[in-house]
Image (spheres, rainbow, N blue to C red):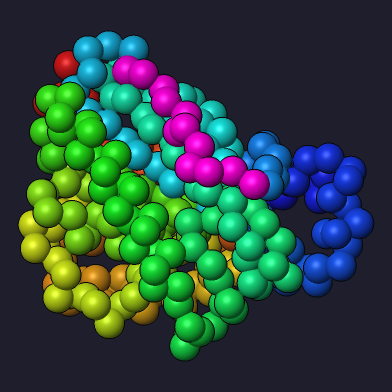
Amino acid sequence: GSSGINAEYGGRHLTQLLKKLTAHELKIGNCISRSFLSADMTQPEPVIIEATGTHKATVIFLHGLGDTGNGWSDVMSGELNMDHVKYICPTATSIPVTVNMGMRMPAWYDITSISENADEDDAGIKKSSSYVQSLIEEEEKKGIPSDKIFVGGFSQGGAISLYAGLSYKNKLGGIIALSCYLPLRNEFPGIVTANKDTPLIQCHGSMDPVVPYRFGQVSSILINSFNPSIQFRTYTGLGHSACPEEFRDVKKFLTQNLGDLAAS
């Protein structure tokens, strides 16, 4: 969860701006981040945690709204770390976010409102997905087979990982979707080619006040209709954040889908 406005967004100069937000709007940015809000950036460099052993697999993990790659790098180098795995935590470009009164913050796409039939930022979602797919391609060029590459993310980052992962041209090792939903759902399953049975773990807190639990459920049912290799996990009482039990489940998912590699 969040440990207060200053810890979440860093710097007192933002406190006045943030005081104008309602509690609900502010929660959009909540996550386990220990990073700060940075304004005006082009596409920043990702945070990269190199494999401690021989590099044989890669996990690309996307942060939530208002966060940066640093916010999740501690989890990748800690709770989810595995010897032969390289972790890439990209940072989104800063854009004005409508639901947060047009404030600029790192975001994978604009959000007008959190509701079932809200207008979606089609161009923003596709642009971020293309960027993620280019990161996957770079790993393939370095000799990592696509089925040893995992994409995942939290909240907005999870939504992009679902879109980019399911629509990728080559079969991936797996997709990790935390506290999120499937964006541009009407495009599915039409845009899915190589990833119709790619292992997928979707995790959601039952008390999520930002991305309602039901959104996660509905997305998992839709995905299950064309990809039966999905598992949906519920964390009772969890809000819009992550928890140790969830990290254990995700690590187990990675271990199972890396096969012999995880034991080597």
Q: Is residue 244 visible?
A: no
Most extreme residue toward the bottom, as rendered? 117
**Quadrant in the picture for the C terminus:** top left
Quarter-wise, where is residue 96 in the image? bottom right
**Majority secondary structure in the magenta region:** loop
What residue is at 9 percent from the left and 63 percent from the top?
Answer: 193
Q: Is residue 113 magenta?
A: no
- The foreground one among 170 and 253 is 170
Does residue 132 appear to the left or right of 195 in the view shown? right
Q: Is residue 12 in view?
A: yes
Query: Which residues lie in the magenta part?
Result: 40-51
Percent coordinates x, y for residue 182 in the rendering: 35, 70
261 left or right of 19 in image = left
Is residue 42 shown left or right of residue 51?
right
Is 66 on the left-hand or right-hand side of 9?
Answer: left
Quadrant of residue 52 within the rendered picture: top left
Q: Number of labelled discs?
A: 0
Q: Position of residue 89 (x, y in %)?
A: 44, 36
Residue at (27%, 82%) from the top-left corner?
186
Where residue 191 sits in the image (x, y, percent)? 16, 70
When the figure is inspected, residue 237 is found, relative to residue 70, above or below; the finding is below
Q: Please determine whether, in this image, residue 65 is positioned above or below residue 190.
A: above
On screen, 186 above or below 164? below
Residue at 21% in and 71% down:
224
At a point 64% along the width and 72% down the height, the residue shown is 98
Q: Residue furthest top?
A: 53
